[in-house]
Image (tube, rainbow, N blue to C red):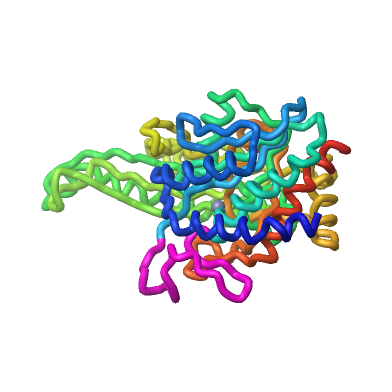
Amino acid sequence: METKARNILPDAINFLRTIILTPSLSGEEEEVARKIARQMVSLDYDEVSIDSFGSVIGRIGNGPRKIMYDAHIDTVGIGDPEAWAHDPYCGKQEDGWVWGRGASDNKGGLVSILYGASLAKRNLPEDVTLYVVGSAMEEDCDGIAFKTIIGENNIRPDVVLLSECTDLDVYRGHRGRMEIKVITRGESCHASAPERGCNAIYKMTRIIEGIEALNDKLKDDPFLGKGTVAVTKVTGSGPSLNAVPDLCEIFMDRRLTAGETRESALQEIRDIVEATGIEADVEVLVHEAKGWTGKEVKMEKYYPTWTLPEDHASVQAGVAAAEEALGHRPAVSRWTFSTNGVYTAGLEGIPSLGFGPALEAYTHSVDDRVSEEDMLRAIMFYALYPKHYSRG
Ligand SMILES: [Zn+2]
């Protein structure tokens, strides 16, 4: 397998550089999606399509056991261009590394699944169908592409492998998150006589104090880490800066650990509101997205915590495939950040796990890069996984 993977590596690295040269911010992935679809055709995939939200889907084989490989095709922006040591879109190749925006997150992973699957095709177990997905808009809203992939295209895989950075270890979950808004209302009046009105911001301060205290009381988990909450934005408004505000809204980022759900997290905030005796609305924010195809999709900003047990057959197949690809046993761990697994595992309950080249530390940074040797190992992993899964 290593020889076969080494033979296709130069072509894989070339394609990686091509797609790094093609900027693909969330919602602007058309060019990169079309390049990926063409590459799947030239790699002899059995079927290639682009769905209504702009994700690319390739299929190999036609068996009853459906494995799905995923990489998102969008990237975050580049921030300050001056902060980069080189052009973030040049795809520089030097000393065994490929550099540029998206190299680590998630274009290196994308090329690994693309080429790994093409190698797997040569002796794919008969009972397996392999889907290779380049999903749109993950950076803006994790999981949103899967509303279309699973919900509308009616593809329901038995296992999903996420190629986000794992430094060639096997990952089996991460904390969830949600974005919550609290609204208080008051009564505006001229600010020169505030006693005539009711200040919505003053009402909110007591709720904010409660949320600050809540953070220390949240659950911890030995595998996933601690749940957290932080107020990240406060806005107050009234008729003018010389009027008592009649509306105050706060926004918070809530990270969810094991055992914390949408309902439990909302209830905690409602309890704080109730303890203050103040009337306030508590809501989960909704993300509204428009894909490059023009399709509009809405998704509540609740991204559930998910983990797959270490002894699950899909994880064990991942460990076996990684061991064969690497020549040593991988660690089994979890991500610090969030992935499309919030949808596949968190909302749909589909066993999901991760294996990818590069380090989380390179993502979204001016140090964005992936090593060619990691790419080789990841390609081998994705070529080997169906065989190990099929035995499980
Ligand atoms: Zn990513």
Tell me if I can see residue 292 in this picture.
yes
Q: Quadrant of the C terminus?
A: top right
Choose between 39 and 182: the one closer to the eye.
39
Magenta span of residues = 78-102
Count of numbered badges drawn on the protein = 0
Q: Residue shown at 69%/66% (left/top)? A: 373
124 vs 195, left or right, is right
Choose between 123 and 341: the one closer to the eye.
123
198 vs 325, left or right, is left
**Residue 319 image position (x, y, % from top left):** 82, 51
**Residue 173 image position (x, y, % from top left):** 68, 47
Q: Residue shown at 49%/64% (left/top)? A: 91
**Residue 37 image position (x, y, % from top left):** 53, 40
Say which quarter of the image contains residue 95.
bottom right
Secondary structure character of the magenta stretch overall = loop
Choose between 167 and 66: the one closer to the eye.
66
Q: Residue shown at 48%/43% (left/top)? A: 33
Tell me if I can see residue 336 in this picture.
no
Assess whether residue 83 is covered by the magenta stretch.
Answer: yes
Residue occupying the far right of the picture: 391
Q: Decide: is 319 above or below 189.
A: below
**Residue 2 image position (x, y, % from top left):** 79, 58
Assess whether residue 351 is covered by the magenta stretch.
Answer: no
Q: Quadrant of the N terminus?
A: bottom right
Q: Decide: is 177 above or below 263.
A: below
